Amino acid sequence: MPRPTPQAILRRLAERNTVRVAVTGLRRCGKTVFTTSFVHNLMSAGQWPDLLPFLKVAARGDLIAAEVFPLPGVPMFPFEHSLAAIVGGGTAHGAHGWPAATDRLCGLRIAVRYRSRRTLNVLRGRRVRTLNIDLVDYPGEWLLDLPLLAKDFATWSAETMALAAREPRARHVREWQAAVDAIDAQASADPVALKRAATLYAEALRRCAAPEVGLTLHQPARLLRPGEFSPDSPLLELSPLPPPRDGAPPPAGSNFAAMAARYDAYRERIVAPFYRDHFRYFDAQIVLVDVLGALKAGQAAFDDMRAAIAAILQSFDYSRSGFRAWLEGALTERVLFAATKADHVSSNQHPNLRRLLEEVVAREANRIRFRGVGTEALAISSVRCTEDVVGEVQGQTLSLVRGMPAGRDAETALFPGEIPAHFPGPQDWREGRFRFLDFLPVHVSGARGIPHIGLDEAMQGLVGNHLR
Ligand SMILES: Nc1nc2c(ncn2[C@@H]2O[C@H](COP(=O)(O)OP(=O)(O)O)[C@@H](O)[C@H]2O)c(=O)[nH]1
Ligand SMILES: [Mg+2]
């Protein structure tokens, strides 16, 4: 690396009022809803500081106001649209619902005006400061492409073929499996056979991703969410192939070499820029995990989610420290893990939800702390849709949650099941043990911010240090 120039140092000093927060998580874990509530609540807390009691700058009455700006070079996050969907302004009949699934990269900068209590700022008479918080949003599937950067085609193929041979995947991928088994890796490239393998592979991924199967580890991600690419772009004509039979290196011009070249082009043209522009450098990270959704989906889905999160977290580089890293903007200060949608269960279950999350991410959190980065686990709900009530169920007094389930026309109080504090063992996967429902934010008007659980703790952990 070249020596840092005085210009680079000045540039960094000028940017020191900007923090980049990486919001990471698999599809449907709650990234878009988190971003929307994060922004709206920061914009509301200048007037209603009680909204965010754990965000110290708000609690001490020093948060003045916040405004949204575009992020240079990134399409604008549809904040007003997402907010309107939640607070019921998005449709003619004012129905409350959720923002649409994200299919493109987008982002925003939220500028927070606050009164600083740092001695230096007070002495200089410059108490009113601005902190920019940069956030990007993208389809969660895309994160699963990051691990590909560290794997060549042969390694990725071997791992993917092994995964596909096991249930529950095996029964959904048979047609593709038969098609690739018939391809001779060493023979000269047969474009028709390769195209057919790629088409069947994309279909197999779609089948495994369907809600009733509920698996998450799907690579390459753009086969499911092409984003700005046309679904029939040749860049997306990909499939793993069995290794050459005798282990010999595949000759140039062979089926294997042709597919490996496409795989490399995919990594170079799509994955590397996504990583470089958005995940190489960040100051703080929040990893959102839909622990409850995975519990409800069953053991296979739960295990697949764990494998997917581990694979993703291994692709971030937390190892940098010192002046050089500061200069590059590559010093990560904090990684937060948050179990989302905590409003699906009553508050007395939140400590267990947090403990279960700690077990789910224990390995990765340990690796991150080893690199000198602090970690923390929380149970949060970006938008609180339910309230706790006490009720009788089969003669027992229990804590229930009451809210409006999606697809019904009356509010319901239900006992969603107890969250295990430890990794679910075989006895925990009984049918129907977890009865979480998708509740809608029917009482959320947005007028005084958005009711939430623990969003303020997450904010304090991510950016609190910069708001002093
Ligand atoms: N009850 C409740 N549901 C939530 C919350 N956050 C997200 N959801 C649900 O999870 C779905 C996916 O959230 P979204 O933010 O779009 O996920 P993304 O794919 O990670 O961006 C939403 O459509 C809601 O159904 C929350 O705080 N409370
Ligand atoms: Mg989204």
Image (cartoon, grey):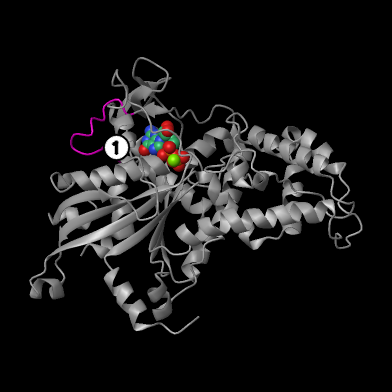
Q: Nearer the viewer, residue 145 or 117?
A: 145
Report ligand 2 position as a quadrant: top left
Q: Compared to 385, does 27 lie above or below?
A: below
Q: Main secondary structure of the magenta part?
A: loop
Apparent side of residue 178 relative to residue 137 in the rendered image (left or right) = right
Q: From the top left corner, tell me how far across and down residue 379 is, in percent.
A: 38, 46
Give the residue drawn at x 66%, y 56%. 265
Q: In which image quadrant can residue 88 be found? A: top left
Residue 60: within the magenta? no
**Quadrant position of the C terminus in the picture:** bottom left
Q: From the top left corner, tell me how far across and down residue 406 is, in percent.
A: 41, 22
Residue 446: within the magenta? yes
Give the residue drawn at x 49%, y 42%. 291
Asked if one can make out residue 386 in the rendered structure from this viewpoint, the answer is no
Q: Which residues are magenta?
A: 441-452
Apparent side of residue 223 relative to residue 293 in the rendered image (left or right) = right
Asked if one can make out residue 135 in the rendered structure from this viewpoint, the answer is yes
Give the residue drawn at x 61%, y 50%. 307
Apparent side of residue 3 relative to residue 81 in the rendered image (left or right) = right
The amino acid beneath tag 1 is: Glu
**What residue is shown with label 1?**
80
Q: From the top left corner, tell me how far across and down residue 275 is, in percent.
A: 52, 59
